[in-house]
Image (tube, rainbow, N blue to C red):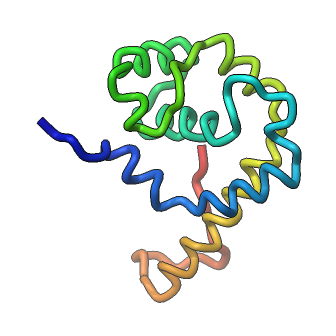
Amino acid sequence: MNTGKTLFAQLMDFLPWTTFTRIVERHGGNRYVKLLACTDQFRVMAFAQLTYHESLRDIEVCLSAQAAKLYHMGFRHEIKRSTLADTNETRDWRIYSEFIQCLIVQARKLYIGDSFGIELENTAYALD
């Protein structure tokens, strides 16, 4: 039996959470939040993206199936569809936009000398 971190938690450890926290504080993202903080929302949406889940119901069912592992994945409590829907509707999108821009800057530094087999005039990104 594996007693270490899940693969998802290990992947989330590579993200610059201090930068994310500064961005959230700048935009007041966690102001008046009771259940789903910005970090939890990001983790849920990253989990959904990595596991190809598209609907809120699908995300909720998949996470509830992993209820025993939620804590080890980095979630503090069970994720409900209505809470996630309300959070996605009201949370400021600029928080995640700024964070993605920081991640793009990091990725550029890592792959600056690599050739991808094609030459592009401008950098192209595919974000879902």
Q: Position of residue 39 (x, y in %)?
A: 63, 42
x and y percent of residue 98 in the render? Answer: 76, 57
Please determine whether, in this image, residue 11 is positioned above or below residue 78.
below
Whether residue 84 is situated above or below residue 40 in the rendered picture? above
x, y (%) of residue 12?
A: 47, 51
Location of residue 86 (image quadrant): top right
Q: Which image quadrant: the C terminus?
A: top right
Q: In screen coordinates, is 23 left or right of 16?
A: right
Q: Is residue 29 found left or right of 8 in the rendered image? A: right
Which residue does the image show at 70% across and 63% down from the upper left?
101
Q: What is the total number of numbered labels drawn onto the structure image? A: 0
Q: Is residue 111 above or below residue 71?
A: below
As drawn, the residue found furthest toward the left would be 1
Which image quadrant is residue 43 in? top right
Residue sitting at 66 percent across and 61 percent down? 18
Give me the residue at 86% from left, 29% from top. 32
* Quadrant (top left, top right, bottom left, bottom right) of the N terminus: top left
Q: Nearer the viewer, residue 123 or 60?
A: 60
Residue at position x 60%, y 13% from top? 81
Image coordinates for residue 97, horizontal then vertical, percent: 75, 52
